[in-house]
Amino acid sequence: MKTSLRDAREQAAPIVQLAEVAEGADAANSSSALPAGADADLAPLERARAFAEPLLTGRVLDTGEDAAGHAEGVAAILQGIGAAPSMRAAAYLVYAGDYLQKPEEVVAKAFGESYAGLVSHTRRLVQIQRAAREAQVGPGQRAEQTERVRKMLLAFSRDLRVVLLRLASRLQTLRWFAATKRACPRALAEESMQVFAPLANRLGIWQIKWEIEDLSFRFLEPEAYRQVAQLLDEKRVEREQGVEAFRIELGDELAVAGLKAEVQGRPKHLYSIWKKMRGKGLDFARVFDVRAMRVIVADVPSCYAVLGRVHERYQVVPGEFDDYIAKPKPNGYQSLHTVVLDAEGRAVEVQIRTRAMHEHAEHGVAAHWAYKEAGAKGYAGVSAGGDFDAQIAEARKAVLRQLLAWERDFVEQGAPAGEGVFDDRIYVFTPQAAVVELPAGATPIDFAYVLHTDLGHRCRGAKVDGAMVPLNTPLKSGQTVEVTALKEGGPSLDWLNGELGFLQSPRSKAKVRAWFNALAMRDTIARGREAVEKLLQREGRTAMKLDDLASQLGFRNADALFEVVGKDEFSLRNIESLLRPAEPPRSVEEEIVARHVRAPGHAPQGGVLVVGVESLLTSLARCCRPAPPDGIGGYVTRGKGVAIHRADCSNFRQMAARSPERVIAVAWGEPRGDRAAVYPVDVVVEAGDRQGLLRDITEVFAKEKMNVTGVKTQTIKDARGGTAWMTFTVELGDASRLAHVLGLVSRVPGVRAARRK
């Protein structure tokens, strides 16, 4: 159960009285404002312990650990690696925060804003870490998920003290499982091995790294762990003592020889020995760096002088000498490596290098962690030379190498370390707690496109940490994003408008553009299909397979043919030529024209009369829409009878010039029955664009009892504010009335011209 602010004050009195004094005061100075009777010199560590003790007593963490004991263990680990008292104090406040209703507010008032921020970030990171560990991802995605978690831990934790606290906390948890001989959950051990140990390695905190690896190895591979331990045939303490004794001996030998050198000793831990045996297929007797020395000197000549003295004093193991100074590794690593035997006949590896070589190996491009982790193929898919690792190397030079020293000089009001190092990437969660990597400033739509292209197309809403947000909301590391999508649909053109900020990822923008390009292509293919199918219908070849037609024309499939036809890049005449390779026999209509059965003066009986032929199929041309009493002419088409054009129609004149034998004389006939015939006529109106224009013009046609059957409008913006072009299709029985009606339309306000099309 959470503890209220009042309860926390009662339980932690008199320490929590600090919060009451801090009411209304500047939080940055609140830690120095003590109530009467309080010890003004009380150290932050002691105050934090006293504050947390009543809150943590009797509490149990989700791992089963005693909360107070865990906090004590974390503080002890931090002390062991040289962290400042303020850092150790934070360990108590972080776990006490789990049992407060408003932990950031309480800690800020009692200890200052810097501690409050540290508590807030660490608690959030714990939640993210737990969610990522429980994420439902497939086996093939586990490696990718693990690497994203590693990156996210650093990217989300701008204050690198948070990372240090998490490393110490994880080590304490592993120690607790080992000490109590309880079974450690495999997911927790795997996360420790795959996330926390490499993180400690990247930060150069070797003491935490090797212990996390050994304990994780113990829980994940108990049989292999026991085998390696038995092969060593000694405890770690004994090995460390042996290494220290050899270090002192070697240092004395070099001093006697007049060689100034710094000698560092380190025992090989169990997991490292097992990994080397497995990776290189070595027998334990061939693992010569179980104990290792590093000798750091001033210059290159001193390296070889030390090497000579070592070989003179100790028995050398044949075939185990490497000169990486004369021939550096591809990544620039330089050092002399040799293996000798100590007084008891145990192999000891000795590495000799200058200070510059040591700094380069530890913190430069050829950092030990980089080439050991990355290898030839890259570390979990991220090569050591990648952008992320380049940023890590720069951060190490500027920040991480001095992390513990910076902690000793820590001032509560200071800015968090590592600011700006990971500003180009963010890491967010799916509802299933899978980590998704995005560019900085990415939006929920970018997130949806990373998950699946189709989900991005159908995205219509999003929740961030359970709250609905606009789709152009920039996301932040650590947030959980849930996308709302339609069952069907596509992206909006607005998403490509950079000023609206819907998309930040170039990959997402490319996917949206591809969707609209595909949509335009579908429309083009549909238009081409319609044209080809109409042609086949006119030619009476509807049974012909479209793919066969495309193949005969040289296209790979029917869609390829439809595409070029839809783009007007391929003339339908080519298809006609294929379907009619030879001159077809004369049609019935042409036979009629050739024979001229009747005289031109034959009286019409109704509708349009084709002179000399009765009941012949006729149609009014749509290009000029003739109507009585227009002068007209007929043109015999193939399969559609006679097309009736106005005599002044430009299309009719061109066809008549090209095929004069197809022209036939026609005349308007008398209407039959009581109902007068009506004809469609197109009228074009040019006007200045304004509201109500269309309504005013249609009212004129209505008053003149002209039925409007169709309207097409288009507005073009110009220097005059906008020009509206309107095409009206009206029905009339006599075209001579049209001039009067057009005159009335021309007097409508804003109309500049009105004419028959």
Image (cartoon, rainbow, N blue to C red):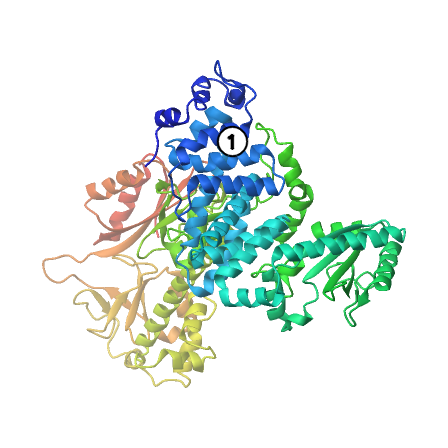
Q: Is residue 750 above or below residue 283?
A: above
Question: Where in the figure is residue 245, as x and y percent of width and height?
Answer: 73, 54
Residue sitting at the far top? 36
Question: Where in the figure is residue 395, as x and y percent of width and height?
Answer: 65, 45
Which residue is pictured at 76% across the width and 69% down the height?
320
Q: Quadrant of the N terminus?
A: top left
Q: Amino acid at mark 1?
A: Tyr
Residue sitting at the far front? 344
* Residue 59, image quadrant: top left
58 relative to 50 in the view: left or right: left
Front one among 362 and 307:
307
Question: Does the rendering let one see residue 385?
Answer: no
Q: Which residue is labeled 1 in the image? A: 115
Which residue is pictured at 20% across the width and 43% down the height?
702
Question: Where in the figure is residue 751, as x and y percent of width and height?
Answer: 35, 38
37 relative to 266 in the view: left or right: left
The residue tagged with tag 1: helix, strand or loop?
A: helix
405 relative to 640 in the view: left or right: right
Question: Does the rendering let one see residue 301?
Answer: yes
Number of disc labels: 1
* Residue 268, image quadrant: bottom right
465 relative to 303 in the view: left or right: left
Question: Where in the figure is residue 524, as x and y percent of width and height?
Answer: 41, 64
Which residue is pictured at 55% across the width and 41% down the height?
76
Packing grade of label 1 (10 A; few <14, some 14-19, many >=20) is many
Front one among 747 and 189:
189
Residue sitting at the far left? 674
* Residue 292, image quadrant: bottom right
